[in-house]
Image (cartoon, rainbow, N blue to C red):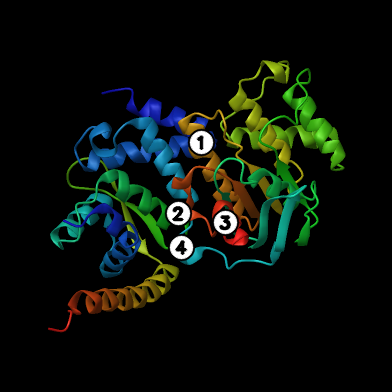
Amino acid sequence: MTPRPWLHGFLDLCLLAMLRERPDYGYGLAQRLAAAGVADVPGGTLYPALLRLEQQGLAVPGWQPSESGPRRKYYAITDAGRDLLDGQAAEWRQFRDGVDALIEARAPR
Amino acid sequence: MSDWPRLFESELLRLGLQPVRARQLTDETAQQAAEHAAPPADVFGPAHLYARHLVAELNTPATAQRLAPGPVLLSLTGVSKRYRRRTVFAGVDLRVRGGEVAAIVGANGCGKSTLLKICAGLTRPSAGEVRRTRRVGFVPQDGGTAGWLTAEEHFTLFGAAAGMVPGRARSTGVHLATRLAWRPSRKQPVQQLSGGTRQKLNLVLGELHAPDLLLLDEPYQGFDQGTYLDFWQQVFAWRDAGRAVVVVTHLLHDLQNVDHVLDLGASFEEGQR
């Protein structure tokens, strides 16, 4: 799957996008990233990113009980998080289209 | 289980986190490992490395949130230096704004330290113009401390030169030292400190009076790996607080996060031709 250096710049974007869809907890987000084929994100990368989102007011945590084991910290996106996500999504599309164009370009025969 | 949570928490404290916050992060980390139904070492790797990584991550603002650069705090235009008939460097231009980091690089003997002293106003350029903000902190490569005085006496002395009362200078100095993972002993004269710790003292003294422009001449000589990382973290914290930082360095792998790189070796050769 995606090498880590690529993901680094886009992890926040992916997390915010998933949280906009619905609130979730760390392990759930990791599974959704893997299922989407984006990346297997190790805990040591995922949780600092979530804490950073929380610290910057882009996501707010809440506690919910789980059917198995201890209660879980669920994150929900904030308005500031939505604004940032909209801006970053536009940047991402521009970047993606640019890279695509470079990859598709071929030398004339 | 293991020592993992205890090691993690003590490293967070060593890195200068408040005890309440360190405890909170340790508890959360245990819960996160439980989500994965795995021991923390499997999820996060070695405790002290994850602690450093986490603190660095939490101190890094998202790129989108980095402040727009502030006013120009240092500006060099066409600066050159000659010793007798030898040109050390010529035609050096550099502008550094608040919220930016500049690195001066180049081989030994190309005049990096001389250029930094010109930035600080301690050496006159042979030609060119230098403009700088009024509040400047300068950290020399070595020296600058008095061996028979303690660290706290240095804080008082340097603070007095900047118009700070002794108590405030001492508490500020101790606080700044903590951010470099150093707790100054009250009685130990500076000559008994290791080279790395003396450099920490120099860094603290350079920052004591809250300057807007920080000029650092390879201030990490003698630092171990952990302290070295703390140092760069500190540089970026200054930057994010809106200060301008100029670092002389010969270590090229640190340059990916700086805003300007002035390669003195290259500019000198161009100036010659």
Amino acid under label 3?
Glu
Q: Secondary structure at mark 2?
A: helix
Q: Position of residue B9 (x, y in %)?
A: 43, 31
Q: Residue at x 55, y 50 (%)?
A: B236
Q: What residue type is disc 2 on?
A: Gln
- CA gap, disc 4 and disc 2: 14 Å
Q: Which badge, 4 or 1, comes first in the chain's sequence?
A: 4
Name the residue that disc number 3 marks: B269
User: Which structural element holds mark 1?
Assistant: helix
Disc on the earlier residue, 3 or 2: 2
Q: In terms of depth relative to the viewer, which is nearer, A42 or B253?
A: B253
Name the kind of residue labelled 1 in the image.
Tyr
- Residues marked 4 and 1, same chain: yes
Is B121 placed above or below B33 here?
A: below
Asked whether residue B60 is in view, the answer is: no
Residue at position x 55%, y 48% from top?
Answer: B106
Q: CA distance from mark 3 to mark 2?
A: 24 Å
Q: Which residue is mark 4?
A: B63
State which quadrant residue B73 falls in. bottom right
